[in-house]
Image (cartoon, rainbow, N blue to C red):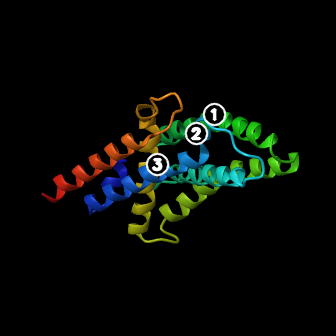
Amino acid sequence: MPETFHTSEDFLQTGSWILVGFYLQLILAFFSHGLEHGHAHVHMDRGSGSGLMLLLALMVHSLMEGAMLGHPHNEHGDHQVSGILMGIVLHKVPAAFALVAILAARMSHVWVLIYLFLFAIASPLGLALGQVLGGGLLASSQARIVLFAIVAGNFLHISTSIFFESNPTHQYGLRKLLLSLLGAALGFLTEWW
């Protein structure tokens, strides 16, 4: 996150994009039912399309994780990349097991393998996207700042989610959502005041 602010000239805008990433991860967690942590908190209905929604949520999450590895500041510090990569790998394994366990009860083995393959390539695709955008090949410096700020917000949510998942169902809850939105609004007000 500090690197994102370091490359930005508009801290308020960068902070806003970090909040977008934070709340985007909250939305993704709603659709993935906590599977990105290696377990699911609800049961899905057979044939309801929820398997596809689960896969899409996990793929967006994985794309953003991979994009963080492609951040230009990570190229100069192998220890940073190794740590982030290790964290991604360590939580991808249980997430993949949970994904297969949920999908195997609802679809054919061929479709389970296709979904697993798509999930497996999402982080490497995110890495490629991060490197292409980070290298300035397809996007302006502002677009790169936006991408990496959203990814930083995604990581911020992941690193703080333990504080929000204090109830037995591990759901965020309306009260906590409203309080976090109030906190974000107060942050904006203090900046503009």
User: Which residue bears the numbered disc 3?
Assistant: 154
First-in-chain label (3 vs 1): 1
Note whether residue 7 is visible. no
Residue density around tag 2, few if under 14, some if 14–19, many if 20 or more, within 10 Å: many
Q: Amino acid at mark 3?
A: Asn
Q: Position of residue 31 (x, y in %)?
A: 58, 49
- Earlier residue among tags 2 and 3: 2
Cα distance, mark 2 to mark 3? 14 Å
Instruction: List the residue tagged with mark 1.
Output: 39
* Snapshot quadrant of residue 150: bottom left
Residue depicted at x 42% and y 49%? 22
Percent x, y of residue 102 = 74, 39
Q: CA distance from mark 2 to mark 1?
A: 6 Å
Query: Of helix, strand and loop, which one carries label 3?
Result: helix
Q: From the viewer's perspective, is 72 left or right of 31?
A: left
Relative depth, front residue between 19 and 29: 29
Circle 3 packing at 10 Å, graded few (<14), some (14-19), many (20+), is many
Query: Do the numbered discs 3 and 1 sit on residues whose CB atoms are within 8 Å?
Result: no
Q: Residue at x 46, y 48 (%)?
A: 154
Location of mark 2 (residue): 34
- Amino acid carrying label 2: it is Gly
Q: Nearer the viewer, mark 2 or mark 3?
A: 2
Q: Marks 1 and 2: in contact by CB < 8 Å?
A: yes
- Tell me which residue sits at (40%, 32%) in the image: 163
**Mark found first going from the N terminus, 2 or 1:** 2
